[in-house]
Image (spheres, rainbow, N blue to C red):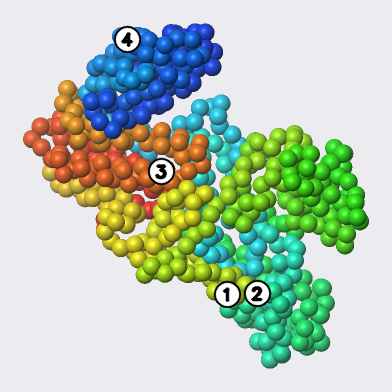
């Protein structure tokens, strides 16, 4: 790194941390695995502008007193790389290093954020940490519309993918269509029964079938397309839909699958959730040479597991030795009837994903899949390259809809559901996306519908969007007085073209600039912890910090350098709010 690049690096918190790490390596050369110099923002100004506990973390490795390490680190760094940006340092407590940054750091950080624009925080991951990642989410049976639980997994999964890509990962979004097995058979029979009813034939929906009104709607569309093609078949089988010939049920089932899938695509597009790959479970059984009675990817997986010595036959079934890898019992892959289990499909599917070259696989599943984790980890241990850490399972919790304090229950089969489209109609896509990532995936989410449509500071999405719209209004007003600092051709858009001079940076400006400088660290934290809720919380904090700044710092002043600096902070805040909302799939309106 050149001296100029190292100097510019200091104006970002991540770069400032890396600079401290290089100085620390000079002080403690015996510690070959130095921890990162994590920076925090102290709650009170008397504790400094930034603080790091890195001396505490390295003390044992270096066999030295942490306060001594912190003191030497502060002295050497402030006399060397940090001389231009750090006014002084203090060592506090058992070994915390508190840095008091100069006004030049705040001016330089603001210039740098303006120069980066929407790329502020991009590629924050080190090159060695970037991976080719497959993220599978939403994946459901195509037997009915997407409900509010799916809205949570869709919002979280898409936000994670956006964050991963922004931070530097190579991400593929995948939807696994569960279109094989007993649930699809029941759906096909249910649709056939509704088709018969619409043609005046008495045929009840089978027990454990799908009763929702949406099945009637799909049946009407089926009649519009095929007319009475299946009239003779349903007449002969009436009143028992389970007596229908397999080939008839298969045709109706696959037609219904495609109809439901088309609805999925429309719903997800409206929710701003794109997918790169749609994989059909049924397709895993097609093509190639059969092995143990199964072709396609399923046959390949069985052959590979047999080669590894992981399968055994017992009681007429085929089993996988998952107890060898920590599962509580071995798992059946092929039943006594010769029918495959869902687990066999999952094995073939994940083996195929590894064959496609993904270094890391992430699945986002519903709360009812919690017990599935041990067998999936066991499966990855059994399959080459025998690396269970290659698979990451994120188990999401339930969503409770609250309206006037009352919760609403849902059941797909009975038809008593609130769909994603219903929810989007009721509160808007922005509110759906923002509220659905407001809490960690491992916590139940209570979504207050009344709050979600309230236009007040109590509504978190309204509060953040209003801050963005307010800044846009401020900048429009500035344009009337001295030119819009947000225009691409404006001097503030190019670092160094406008000098903030030696403008004194006040406490409210410092607080806002530090909050803005945190953004790359927030992105990194959200990526590493798989927590878009961390970005959600940060945006609320940034909006609050801007409102405090705006109340206390007049932007349009007679001092051109003060005006330029404050306008620059406004532009940087607008850009950061817009980028943060974009990463969560939420719009950033310019007026409200």
Task: Identify which residue is drawn at 39% across, 65% down.
Answer: 449
Above/below status of 138 relative to 254: above
SS category of the residue bearing label 2: loop
Mark 1, secondary structure of its residue: loop
| Disc 2 from disc 4: Cα separation | 71 Å
Query: Quick one: label 2, few (<14), some, or many (20+) residues within 10 Å?
Result: many
- Residue 415 disc label: 1
As displayed, is residue 461 above or below residue 501? below
Do residues under tags 2 and 4 come within 8 Å of each other at their CB atoms?
Answer: no
Contact (Cβ within 8 Å) of mark 3 with mark 1: no
- Quadrant for residue 144, please give it: bottom right
- For the question of whether residue 107 can be seen, the reply is no
Residue at 88%, 62% (x, y): give it. Answer: 337
Residue 215, x across and y down, in percent: 62, 76
**Measured Cα–Cα span from mark 3 to mark 1:** 35 Å
Farthest residue toward the left? 558
């Amino acid at each position: 790194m050149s001296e100029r690049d190292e100097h510019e690096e200091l104006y970002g918190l991540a770069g400032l941390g890396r600079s401290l790490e290089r100085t620390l390596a000079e002080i403690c050369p015996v510690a070959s695995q130095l921890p990162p110099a994590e920076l925090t923002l102290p709650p009170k100004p008397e504790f400094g502008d930034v603080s790091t506990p890195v001396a505490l973390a390295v003390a044992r490795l270096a066999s030295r007193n942490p306060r001594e390490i912190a003191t030497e680190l502060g002295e050497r760094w402030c006399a060397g790389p940090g001389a231009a940006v750090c006014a002084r340092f203090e060592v506090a407590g058992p070994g915390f290093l508190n840095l008091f940054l100069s006004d030049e750091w705040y001016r330089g950080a603001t210039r740098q954020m303006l120069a980066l624009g929407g790329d502020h925080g991009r590629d924050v991951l080190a090159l060695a940490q970037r991976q080719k990642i497959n993220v599978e989410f939403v994946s459901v049976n195509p037997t009915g519309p997407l409900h509010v639980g799916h809205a949570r997994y869709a919002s979280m999964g898409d936000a994670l993918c956006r964050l991963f890509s922004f931070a530097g990962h190579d991400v593929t979004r995948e939807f696994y269509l569960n279109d094989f097995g007993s649930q699809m058979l029941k759906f096909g029979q249910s649709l056939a029964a509704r088709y018969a009813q619409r043609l005046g034939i008495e045929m009840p929906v089978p027990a454990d079938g799908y009763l929702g009104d949406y099945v009637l709607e799909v049946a009407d569309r089926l009649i519009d397309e095929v007319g009475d093609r299946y009239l003779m078949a349903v007449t002969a089988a009436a009143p028992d839909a389970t007596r229908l010939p397999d080939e008839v049920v298969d045709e109706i089932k696959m037609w219904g699958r495609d109809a439901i899938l088309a609805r999925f695509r429309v719903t997800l597009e409206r929710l701003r959730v794109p997918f790169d790959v749609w994989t059909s479970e049924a397709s895993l059984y097609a093509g190639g040479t059969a092995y143990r009675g199964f072709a396609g990817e399923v046959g390949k997986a069985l052959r590979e597991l047999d080669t590894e010595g992981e399968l055994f036959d017992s009681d007429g079934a085929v089993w996988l030795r998952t107890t060898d890898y920590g599962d509580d019992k071995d798992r059946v892959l092929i039943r006594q009837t010769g029918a495959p289990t869902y687990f066999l499909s999952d094995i073939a599917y994940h083996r195929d994903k590894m064959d496609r070259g993904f270094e890391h696989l992430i699945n986002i599943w519903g709360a009812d899949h919690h017990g599935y984790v041990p067998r999936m980890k066991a499966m990855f241990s059994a399959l080459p390259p025998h690396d269970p850490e290659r698979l990451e399972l994120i188990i999401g919790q339930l969503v409770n809809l609250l309206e006037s304090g009352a919760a609403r229950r849902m059941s797909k089969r009975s038809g008593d559901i609130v769909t994603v489209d219903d929810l989007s109609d009721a509160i808007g896509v922005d509110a759906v996306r923002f509220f659905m990532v407001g809490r960690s995936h491992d916590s139940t989410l209570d979504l207050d519908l009344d709050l979600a449509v309230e236009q007040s500071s109590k509504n978190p999405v309204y509060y953040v969007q209003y801050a963005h719209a307010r800044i846009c209004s401020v900048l429009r007003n500035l344009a009337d007085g001295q030119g819009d600092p947000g225009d691409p051709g404006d001097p503030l858009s190019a670092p160094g073209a406008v000098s903030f001079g030696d403008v004194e940076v006040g406490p409210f400006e410092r607080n806002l600039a530090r909050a803005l400088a945190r953004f790359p660290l927030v992105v990194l934290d959200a990526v590493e912890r798989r927590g878009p809720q961390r970005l959600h919380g940060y945006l609320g904090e940034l909006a609050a910090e801007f409102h405090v700044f705006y109340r206390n710092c007049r932007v349009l002043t007679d001092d051109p350098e003060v005006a330029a600096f404050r306008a620059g902070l406004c532009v940087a805040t607008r850009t950061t709010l817009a980028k943060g909302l974009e990463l969560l799939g939420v719009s950033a309106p310019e007026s409200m």
